[in-house]
Image (cartoon, rainbow, N blue to C red):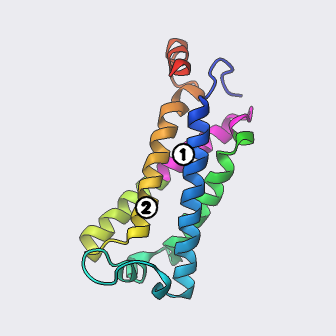
Amino acid sequence: MIPSTYRVPAWAKWTSLGLSLIGLALSIYLTIAHYRGSQILACSDRGLVNCAVVTTSAQSRFLGMPVAVLGLADYVVMSALVTPWAWRSPWRIVHLARFVLATIAMVFVLWLVYAEIIVIGHICLYCTFVHVVTFAQLIVLTRVAPRQLGWTDSSDSAQGAAL
């Protein structure tokens, strides 16, 4: 069970849901582009910003699975974990899973950014949008998860509820 004294602010609930839906839409688009071909990407194919080079590179797969599909799976699960029903769940595991998934996704994003800039030498604009959404999601969840999960004392909880 989660501590009953902390109520997650409405801004955090709605922001996390909005970010997840944006991430889901972008991930769907990138997954479709992966399977239909990078030519459907509305992105430059010349210069530093080159979605085709990034989405067809060796780094566009992780353990044999397309990174776009992993992003899609992440945002399908995250979208479920940030619904109003999930935020009201009495089960601690739901809230812990939300924060852990956001943290793992951000670590993966850091690897992808490294791969784009250092290894590939090009940036995918749509991938960058997903990276920014993932980072914003982690920031929102970092603001509420420690108090929601009881990782801070009650005085922090009272102060956080006022924010």
Considering only vertical position in the picture, is 146 above or below 40?
above
Magenta range? 87-104
C-alpha span from label 1 to label 2? 21 Å
Q: How many marks?
A: 2
Q: Residue at x 61, y 41 (%)?
A: 14
Q: Residue at x 60, y 56 (%)?
A: 21
Instruction: Please name the amino acid that badge 2 sits on.
Output: Phe
Q: Is residue 100 magenta?
A: yes
Which of the two residues, 31 or 145, is positioned nearer the viewer here? 31
Q: Position of residue 18 (x, y in %)?
A: 58, 49
What residue is disc 1 on?
100
**Which residue is at the far top?**
155
Q: Residue at x 52, y 72 (%)?
A: 68
What residue is disc 2 on?
129
Label whose residue precedes the other's in the sequence (1 or 2): 1
Considering only vertical position in the picture, is 159 above or below 137?
above
Considering only vertical position in the picture, is 87 above or below 113?
above
Q: Secondary structure at mark 1?
A: helix
